Image (tube, rainbow, N blue to C red):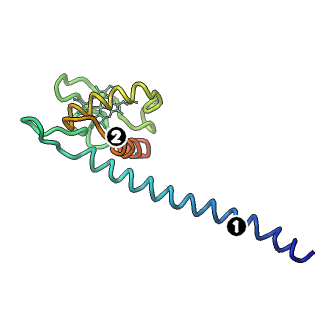
Amino acid sequence: MRLIAILYYLIPLLLIQTVTAGQTISNADTVSASTAGEKLWNQEFTHSEKPRSCAACHGENPGLEGKHVRTGKRIKPMAPSITPGRLTDVKKVEKWFKRNCKWTLGRECTPEEKRHFIAYVENWKE
Ligand code: HEC
């Protein structure tokens, strides 16, 4: 009887610990992914005459309104916490990743880089 009583308390405790440990790992993962994303966002790539960066069109951070470097057109902040609907349409995101990565980096972004960009933009808060 006693053993069952002990197990009764022990099992949920172990379960809770496992879940919290998992969260800690994924939080740390998110933090390092967004830090990497932030770096990439502001990094200047020099494959053309003038240095290019995501920030050049989108602003220094995803909370700011951007301005297209060539057309001067305004671009609403990239952060979903400010502009509803951002990063909700996979097709749109993929289309712009393709176009913007080619223009900015001179090549398509790797899945890792995309993950970092998304972590940064998605978690950006004022
Ligand atoms: C030459 C200007 C320019 C540069 C540089 C640029 N973008 Fe963009 N980006 C745009 C425009 C224009 C849009 C579409 C307008 C809109 O959605 O408001 C867009 C849209 C996006 C979207 C779609 C967001 C959504 O609505 O879901 C993502 C993601 C994105 N850009 C990421 C990036 C990343 C990452 C970089 C750097 C590698 C980058 N962009 C560099 C101009 C640019």
Q: Where residue 98 sits in the image (x, y, percent)?
A: 30, 30
For badge 1, the amino acid type reads Leu
Residue pushed farthest bottom? 2
Give residue 121's position: percent from left, percent from top.
Answer: 38, 42
Neighbor class of circle 1 (other Cα within 10 Å; few <14, some 14-19, many 20+) is: few
Residue 17 sits above or below residue 27 on the image: below
Q: Nearer the viewer, residue 75 or 98?
A: 98
Which residue, given by chain and number where applicable, does mark 2 sit on? 62
Q: CA distance from mark 1 to mark 2?
A: 39 Å
Which residue position holds label 1?
Answer: 14
Dot 1 or dot 2, earlier in sequence: 1
Give the mark count. 2
Badge 2 residue CB within 8 Å of ligand 1: no
Q: Position of residue 6 (x, y in %)?
A: 83, 74
Mark 1: secondary structure = helix
User: Is 47 on the left-hand or right-hand side of 60?
Assistant: left
The residue lying furthest to the left in this view is 49
| Occupied quadrant, residue 23 | bottom right
* Helix, strand or loop for disc 2: loop
Amino acid found under the numbered disc labelled 2:
Pro
